Amino acid sequence: MKQDYYEILGITKNASAAEIKKAYRKKAVQYHPDKNPGDAEAEANFKKAAEAYEVLSDPDKKARYDQFGHAAFEGNGGFGGGGMNMDDIFSQFGDIFGSAFGGGGGFGGFGGGGGGQRRVKGSNLRIRVKLTLEEVANGVEKKVKVRRKVQADGVTYKTCATCGGRGQVTKITNTILGRMQTAATCNVCGGSGQMIDKRPSNADGQGLKVAEETVSINIPAGVEEGMQLKVPNKGNEAPGNGVPGDLLVAIETIDHETLKREGDNLHYDLYISFSEAVLGTSKEIDAIGGKVRIKLEPGIQSGKILRLRGKGISGLNSYGSGDLLVHINVWTPKELNREQKEFFKKMQNNENFVPKPEKSDKSFFEKVKDMFS
């Protein structure tokens, strides 16, 4: 089982943003490769801490993690950094470490400071994917066409003359406290440390061109409207030796004709005639995966809710499935012929037609309470 992000950083769910950042820095320094050369376990813990920080430092990702746990991030790398390599970590979070390892945050040549060349990350792309209720319930693989920037064939790069390939430029300022040295991203190469040497005619100023690619997205069962999945490295590529951005997939759901979703449960309104309610009947209703037949006992009351266990949605953060709740609605005829009217007039004082609710017949409010229990 995957370790809890809060446990990895040694904090509680109520930790502030500053406490999360402080806890991550402490773990990162503890397990840093420069302090633990050749230690595979330390490197694994270093990556775990970075993955936990990537989620918990983002308010939106943190809220989703608090609600759904690791299940919200399953498929295509999810929201977390499970697929991050050391370059990614230092590129994204190098500023967290400060000068703990010297050189303004440079680490073993991975970048993030003055000690080495930065690896620029390409921009993310965002798309929307619409899912049917059946696809939500079962999970699905979607293939989508994405237009993304990729490096053009034949483009070559050279070392940036302004920063000397470091990706950063330093500036020394005299202050009342003495001489202060600051580092900033090179505005000529954008921090990549490289400039275009040769550029084919079909490439833009960064040596990139737009290409269409079919991307496969594995969507887990139980996703909800508004969720966002991440497909790593399928966004726009970066110039030179940079790393690609990500493809962010926003989930939209298509309303089902007869079934309504509420969490992991599904609701179905079944209308029956007065005679069917009196005599009993069997009905075929919609369910995920096809039709199911249910039996209605004679004398069934309008408002009764039948619960078909396990016929709902498989939740992202649970091992089972929700239920299908069938709401019985007895349809009262609006028009009657003379013979029918005479029959019901005779039945007005008949004891079989006088309402006699039993203790087992729950009120409306009790039924609503049961639905949410």
Image (cartoon, rainbow, N blue to C red):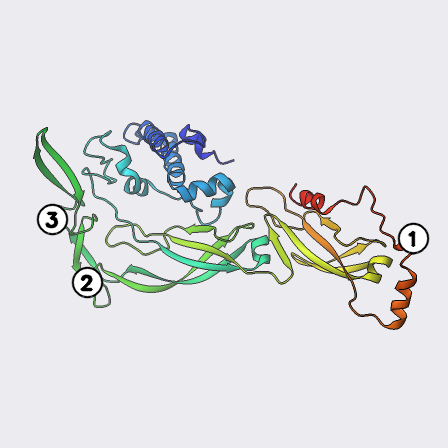
Amino acid type of the residue that numbered disc 3 sits on in the rendered structure: Thr
Amino acid type of the residue that numbered disc 2 sits on in the rendered structure: Arg
Q: Which residue is mark 1?
A: 351
Could you tell me how far apart the alpha carbons at marks 1 and 2 are, in whole angstroms? 93 Å
Q: Position of residue 321 (x, y in %)?
A: 63, 46
Q: Which residue is mark 2?
A: 199
Amino acid type of the residue that numbered disc 1 sits on in the rendered structure: Glu
Q: Nearer the viewer, mark 1 or mark 2?
A: 1
Q: Position of residue 252 (x, y in %)?
A: 50, 57
Q: Is residue 105 left or right of residue 3?
A: left
Characterize the local packing of mark 1: few (<14), some (14-19) or many (20 or more) Cα atoms within 10 angstroms.
Answer: few
Q: Which residue is mark 3?
A: 162
Q: Quadrant of residue 353?
A: bottom right
Disc 3 is placed on an element classified as loop
Q: Quadrant of residue 63?
A: top left
Q: Nearer the viewer, residue 289 or 261?
A: 261
Q: Any mark on residue 150, and which?
A: none
